[in-house]
Image: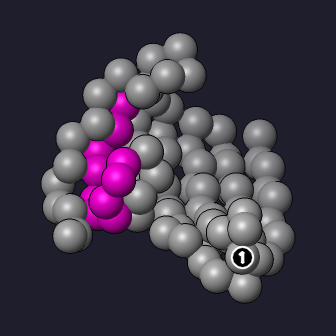
Amino acid sequence: MFYIQINSDEGFVSLGSFSITWANSVDPFFADERLEGFCSFNFDRFSLEFGAIDHDRPGFYITTYRDGDIESSMPVFQLP
């Protein structure tokens, strides 16, 4: 099944077990300021994540999920 949802701040495209998700986060207090955005390439329960999705620092992470929760997340590269 193919699904696509895109707007000016985020997007989601999926085809079967593969999906791509991205977002340009907007600061909830100052709408004109952007926080860390992210991009995630997902297959089944594995993700290659770029940005600061579930972490304090932006970088490149390999993440696995189980039952909708993070099972493990390994940083490959982090920025200060």
Q: Position of residue 79 (x, y in %)?
A: 22, 69
Pick out the residue farthest to the front: 29
Instruction: Name, please, the residue furthest toward the left.
Output: 76
Whether residue 41 is in magenta: the answer is no
> Is 50 situated above or below 7?
above
Q: Is residue 57 left or right of residue 3?
A: left
Which percent across, then down, holds residue 5? 81, 59
Answer few, some or many: residues within 10 Å of disc 1's Cα (few below 14, many 20 plus, some between 14 and 19).
few
- Span of residues in magenta: 55-64
Q: Quarter of the image holding residue 72?
A: top left
Which residue is located at x 20 percent, y 49 percent? 75
Q: Which element type, helix, strand or loop, lies under badge 1?
A: loop
79 is higher (above) or lower (below) than 3: below
Figure label count:
1
Q: Position of residue 3 (x, y in %)?
A: 79, 50
Identify residue for label 1. Answer: 30
Q: Quadrant of the C terminus?
A: bottom left
The residue shown at (65%, 39%) is: 16
Instruction: Please name the residue shown 29% across and 36% down the image.
Output: 73
Q: What kind of secondary structure does the magenta stretch mostly adopt?
A: strand
Depth check: 35 or 46 in front? 35
- Quadrant location of the N terminus? top right
From the viewer's side, name the closer residue of 44 and 77. Answer: 77
For the question of whether residue 50 can be seen, the reply is no
Q: Position of 77 compared to 42: left or right?
A: left
Residue 45 quadrant: top left
